[in-house]
Amino acid sequence: MFRFLLTRLAGAAVAALLSSLAVFLLMRAVPGDIVSQMLGQSGNDRTAEEALRGFFGLDRPLWSQFGDWLSATLSGDLGRSWYQGRPVTMLVWEAFLVTAEIAVATLVIATLVGVPLGVLAGIREGTRTDAAIQAFNLLGLSAPVFWIGLMLLVGASAWLEWSPPFAYMPPGVDLVENINIVILPVLSLSLLQAAAYSHFVRDTMVAELRKEYVRAAIAKGLAPRQIYFKHALRNILIPLVTFVGLILIQILGGAVVIESLFSLPGLGRLILAGIQGRDYPVVQGALLFVVLIALVVNFAIDLLYGLIDPRLKP
């Protein structure tokens, strides 16, 4: 087990290093930088341009800039925002708390809705129930998340004469106000992810119920409920755990759009604002944090495999 953990941690460290290098280079590949934005129309002032590039450290070679940033990052310092002047670590953490609330609520709702629908569709394969659930899956998977969010926003305003507040309120300050703010963003993401859950579980369940051991159990006279839930559902837990990790990462990606649509101060909105303003420390720090979250999720999934199926223990 120790060797297994060590191997996974080493792989995660390499992935984090390569991801940080990719983020660093991609940001430099975007046309324009903070200096050109600050100078604006007076961009021909060479003296001011050189002074600003020296101030932000953009006059040095890329390898030197990356080395300094990586060294500071390994010591826990992600730098300061070039626009706000605040530590990037603080900005990222504040934004992460908002995104985490949206992600956890979405994951819980999508799991509670999508998994039972997928199991039911798998058990009722070929029936009207299966067709109805598959229609829901098709709708959820084909509709863009921003369109779902807009339709929910328009529907709530037109039919219920209600619109959510656009100033974020932490749950620790006012829980009711917080629910009013996050309910539509969470529902927007939950519809898509519940459809993805249902589609995956349905197909996996159908494939499992066609296996020989299920036919043998039916021939022996086992109760259908025992076959479905004690055997078939238990055997799809391993691929389901993997899928949960993918769903969580997809939720983080969808949060970029939803947070912008509903004006939520999460990681997605922070990254977009940093890209638009060419605030390199903010974008690099926030994206590195997202990569670390993905690596932690994958690491947790590897550990869960051994708990679900002892045969997979290293």
Image (tube, grey):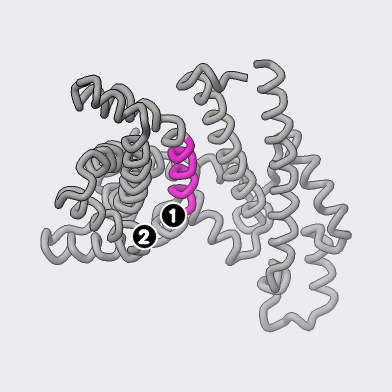
User: Which residues, given as a range, are shown in magenta?
Assistant: 242-253
Q: Mark 2 points at which residue?
A: 145
Residue type beneath disc 1: Gly
Q: In this view, does 46 lie to the left or right of 122?
A: right
| Measured Cα–Cα span from mark 1 to mark 2 | 7 Å
Instruction: Find residue 54 and report its horizontal and vertical position in percent.
Output: 84, 62
Residue sitting nearer the eye, 272 or 307? 307
Residue sitting nearer the eye, 160 or 305? 305
- The quadrant of the rendering that contains the C terminus is top right
Hey, which quadrant is residue 235 in on the image?
Answer: top left
Say whether marks 1 and 2 touch (CB < 8 Å): yes
> Can residue 33 be seen?
yes
Above or below, comparing residue 3 to residue 208 in the picture: above
Above or below, comparing residue 101 to residue 3 in the picture: below
Disc 1 secondary structure class: helix
Residue sitting nearer the eye, 29 or 122? 122
Q: Name the residue under label 1.
A: 254
Residue type beneath disc 2: Val
Disc 2 secondary structure class: helix
Task: Name the residue rendered at 18%, 60% in the picture.
Answer: 156
Task: Name the residue rendered at 69%, 48% in the picture.
Answer: 19
Sequence order check, earlier mark of 1 and 2: 2
